Image (tube, rainbow, N blue to C red):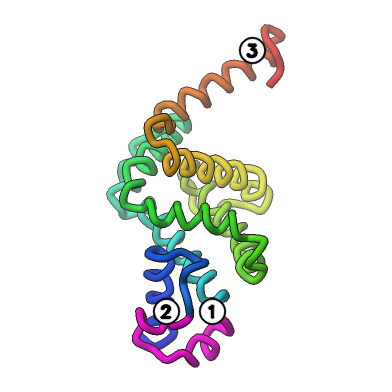
Amino acid sequence: MGHREDLLEGAKRCLLEKGFARTSARDIVAASGTALASIGYHYGSKDALLVQAYVQAMQEWADEFGPGTAIGADLESASSPIERFELVWNRIVEIFPERKPLWALSVEVAVHAEDLPQMREGLSRAQPFGWSALVALFHGVDESEVDEQMAVTLGRFYAALLNGVMSLWLFSPETAPSGRDLAEAMRAILVLHQGAAAGAGPAV
């Protein structure tokens, strides 16, 4: 790997160990075995590097669910959309302990967004790609098939749900929902909606 890749890997390790606020440029240099000037040369600033490192960490998490992986093969066994929804959530919850630092980092990102404008702007630009990836994951389609409307409508919904559920697992794992809990909630919403459409219940 060159210095650019070394910096990215070092920044990612620092983020997962120390978070955004506590990671300094010198921490990244020490973790990557590079020089301080390399950060500006390759990324422009420490914050820009940290944004890319965070996006890559999230992408690596998403890749665990992709085609050719054990989890991806398991998801292909789903016989219906709601079953796939449940399977995806079961796997997300199962690997949560290994990925806990990543989700703790996500909470920090949300908390400090106003104080780190460059980070906020960089992540805002990256968000639509994350939305598309989530639609592909939950619906079992190739990401190239996800159009802008699907990404905005469905992807934002899944992103909001994902961040909320992971926050519950961080703060109160004993009461956080399982994949089955979430699937049952979705089934209940669908039943209410169908009842309302037939004039048999309240609109939702």
Task: Report the residue marked by disc 2.
Answer: 28
Q: Do the residues labelled 2 and 1 touch (CB within 8 Å)?
A: yes
Tag of residue 46 = 1
Residue at position x 43%, y 44% in the image: 170
Q: What stretch is highlighted in magenta?
A: 25-45
Q: Identify the mark nearer the N-term, 3 or 2.
A: 2
On screen, 46 above or below 21?
Answer: below
Question: What's the residue type where badge 2 is placed?
Answer: Ile
On screen, 8 above or below 93?
Answer: below
Question: What's the residue type where badge 3 is placed?
Answer: Gly
Question: Nearer the observer, disc 3 or disc 2?
Answer: 2
Tag of residue 195 = 3
Q: In the shown orientation, is residue 146 left or right of residue 181?
A: right
**Crowd class of label 1 (few under 14; some 14 to 19; many from 20; radius 10 Å):** some
Residues at marks 2 and 1, CA–CA distance in whole angstroms: 9 Å
Is residue 31 in the magenta section? Answer: yes
Q: Is residue 79 visible?
A: no
Question: What's the residue type where badge 1 is placed?
Answer: Lys
Element under label 2? helix
The quarter in which the N terminus is drawn is bottom left
Tag of residue 159 = none
Element under label 3? helix
Residue 77 x/y as whole percent = 33, 37
Residue at position x 43%, y 33% in the image: 176
Q: Identify the mark nearer the N-term, 2 or 1.
A: 2
Residue at position x 50%, y 55% in the image: 106
Is residue 184 in the magenta section? Answer: no
